[in-house]
């Protein structure tokens, strides 16, 4: 069974192509830099199943980024709402630390919640 890492990235980061790539580069590496959580050992703990359900809901633009990464596009407000929905399923100290990082993001930007399969 695959393992996943998930994080919030900047939708408009240099070098990241939300629209995807048609060249051989599609195979790997088309993910934005990680903004939240900042600590490498922390993770949002969203799975591919979580991505599929949010993509299927039609509430968020969603797409496959490369061979093993998928994302939904969200505003900061939407990101906070999604994080608030999972509060009861996360360790309190990790949930609070990550929520504080989301709150610190600029309001006027678009973000992506990325789910990556680990090899």
Image (spheres, rainbow, N blue to C red):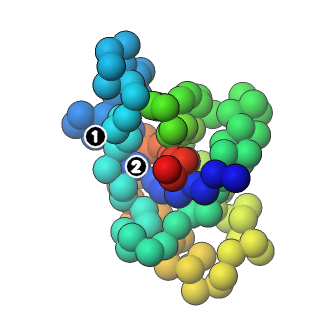
Seen in the picture, residue 23 relative to 18 is either above or below; the reply is above
- Res. 77 in view: no
Q: Which residue is mark 1?
A: 13
Q: Secondary structure at mark 1?
A: loop
Dot label at residue 5 = none
Instruction: Pick whichever, 26 or 110, lies toward us.
Output: 26
For residue 9, the mark is 2
Which residue occupies 36% across, 55% down?
34
- Residue 31 at x, y = what percent? 38, 41
Give the residue at the far left of this rendering: 14
- Where residue 26 sits, quadrant-wise, is top left
Q: Residues within 10 Å of mark 2 (few under 14, many from 20)?
A: many
Q: Secondary structure at mark 2?
A: strand
- Distance from disc 2 to disc 1, alpha carbons, whole Å, reads 8 Å
Query: At which x and y percent is residue 40?
Result: 39, 70
Q: Is residue 23 above or below residue 3?
A: above
Nearer to me, 75 or 20:
20
The quadrant holding residue 57 is top right
Q: Residue at x 48, y 73 (%)?
A: 42
Q: Is residue 91 something that shows in the picture?
A: yes
Q: Nearer the viewer, residue 108 or 37?
A: 37
Callouts 2 and 1 close, C-beta under 8 Å: yes
**Residue name at image x 50 percent, y 79 percent:** 97
The image quadrant of residue 13 is top left
Q: How many marks?
A: 2
Residue 113: x %, y % from top left: 52, 47
Query: x, y percentage for residue 60?
Result: 63, 34
């Amino acid at each position: 069974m695959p393992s996943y890492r998930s994080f919030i990235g900047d939708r408009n980061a240099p070098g990241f192509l939300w629209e995807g790539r048609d060249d051989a580069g599609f195979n790997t590496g088309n993910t934005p830099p990680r903004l939240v959580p900042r600590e490498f050992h922390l993770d949002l703990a969203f799975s591919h199943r979580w991505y599929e359900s949010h993509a299927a809901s039609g509430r968020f633009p969603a797409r496959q980024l490369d061979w093993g990464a998928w994302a939904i596009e969200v505003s900061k407000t939407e990101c906070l709402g999604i994080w608030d929905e999972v509060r009861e399923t996360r360790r309190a100290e990790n949930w609070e630390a990550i929520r504080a990082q989301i709150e610190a993001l600029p309001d006027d930007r678009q973000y992506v919640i990325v789910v990556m399969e680990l090899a």
